[in-house]
Image (tube, helix red, strand yellow):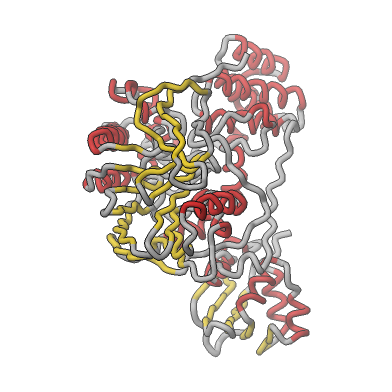
Amino acid sequence: MRILLYLSLIIIFACNSKSESKTNVAAPFTEEIHIDDDFYFEKGIYQVVDNVYVAIGYGLANSVLIAGETGNIIIDTTEDPELGKQINAEFKKISNLPNKAIIYTHSHVDHWRGAPGFFEENTKVFAHSTFQKGFFDQNNLLRPILTERGMKQFGHFLPDSLKRGHGLGFTLNFDFEQPPVIYPTDFLNQQTSMLSIGGIDLEIQHTPGETDDQIIIYYPEKDVVISADNYYMRFPNLYTIRGTSYRDTKSWYKSVDAMRSYKPDFLISCHGPFLTGEKIIEERLTIYRDAIQYIHDYAVRGANLGKTPDELVENFEYPSFFLENYDLQEKYGKVSWSIRNVYNGYLGFFDGKAVNLEPLSAHKRAKHIFELIGSKEQLISEINKANQSKNYQWAAELSDVGLLNFPNDDQIKNLYSISLENLSLVETNPIARNYYLSEAYELTNKINPSLEYTVSAEQAKNIPLSTFFDAMGPRLNSEKAKNKLIKIGFNITDSDEKFGVIVRNQIAEISNSYDDSFDVIVSVDSNTWKGIVLKTVSAVQAIASGKLKIDGESIKFLQFSSLFNND
């Protein structure tokens, strides 16, 4: 029988008649509601102060409205344009003024992907300049693997009956048809920037934490801080199992200190309910940052004593303030992952033991372990024994040994699936649970995820062309590029941009220039080239129509193009 994990969420929902929309007021800590392991909220628009509202329960992330004298400011847009459209309709009941600005707090898709639902003709879109790298890494450079692992993390393909939430909210509304990307029109380059929009003055700080491009927003007139994802009512995701660049824990707790320095009366998280009261906010932010520093210092201290990541995780003891604090439940981030991340962020993969300088591959190790066990029958017996004794991790590891030796064996696949399902039953972290179940169901073909994106040139027209060129290096088919030296220059006719791509030594060097030594110069407008990259425009037809012109040997350009076809 599946174990139900109960949380206490303390929040009051009350109607407010100030506007035509259903507007709720979230009050601090007066009534206890028992729920499952989801972060549950009654879907609605919640009033923070007279002109600040937050949409909760629509998608994975919140969306915030600041209604100004001459226009509205929207902060974050959820993950889905249809959700954004629904929220915007409710916001318009509160203030029907134009949406003067959208502010992205960072580059995770649940904060910007719903922007088409809010975007209007003259809307400006703001983000920190470091947004560009985060956006590129997630949506171009590493999209295939981050999508595969992210869908497992969020249990996207699991049957509805097994979905229990993601730690920060119940739903992730996501499909694989990319909506039009509303890319930032204005980038903030300073540590602290001031914005005046629609009669509203905001102070914006660049505060790396969950992402390097994270910002917090302070509205001084109303004493409101918007924390983005540097604070939410869960143990922070100091490492995410879908994969991420190093999340600098020292920067993160310093960023929480930046929030504390304002001593705000209201703190709006971009996930979950908001907090009211300077004292409550100070207490909770202080414990939150202390927990992050505790993990950071514990990992660094242990590393300096020569301990390995495994030893650090195994020896960790929770301090009492961890166990007693509502915000530090491991319902999103997890301490064990965080310790490993700090270690790896400072010291890399090597744990200091000579035997681990060049470890055996998983296949070779599995072969040797199987030889020690002696037979498939004995291996199966050991897997069953481990499951029966509730040693589920060992059962899963033995199953992995079996599958590496017998990759097509249905019995071993089934045992592996059972072992992972057993792990999911005892796992209290929703993200880990989703991952265990997703992989278990894939092993036995109960789910067959399709991860193909559909992106049109129209949908991608707002993405900078440089993003497309920067992605060419990893897209190069290195086998096809053996012994090739090809230099292609690109003259982008509608933007006066220039790019150079040199294929050499099985890599593609990308630059913002070319010279007379290049084999071919291609003249093309940006949208045509994006369409060719996305395979929505035929290069042959573009040449025939004159939209793409080649100065040099056409055969060289065709050879070059074939090197980026990984089919």
Query: Does residue 141 appear to the left or right of 550 in the view shown?
Result: left
Instruction: Please say whether residue 347 is visible from this viewpoint.
Output: no
Taking depth in this image into account, of 355 and 478 the one nearest to the observer is 478
Residue at (71, 27) in percent of width and height: 413
Horizontal placement of 453 versus 267: left or right? right
Instruction: Please tell me which residue lies in front, 394 or 37.
Output: 37
Q: Position of residue 299 (x, y in %)?
A: 31, 34
Q: How many marks?
A: 0
Is 147 drawn above or below residue 336 in the view shown?
A: below
Residue shown at 41%/29% (left/top)?
11
The percent position of residue 397, horizontal first and vertical second, equals 58, 25
Give the left or right position of residue 283, taking residue 239 as reference.
Answer: left
Q: For the N terminus, give its image quadrant.
A: top right
Q: Quadrant for residue 75, please give it.
A: bottom left
Q: Quadrant of residue 200?
A: bottom left
Q: Is residue 542 above or below residue 90?
A: below
The quarter of the rendered structure image containing the C terminus is bottom right
In the rendering, at what x and y percent does residue 87 appear? 54, 49
Q: Nearer the viewer, residue 77 or 155?
A: 77
Q: Position of residue 234 (x, y in %)?
A: 41, 33
Q: Residue at x 42, y 63 (%)?
A: 71
Res. 238 visible in picture = yes
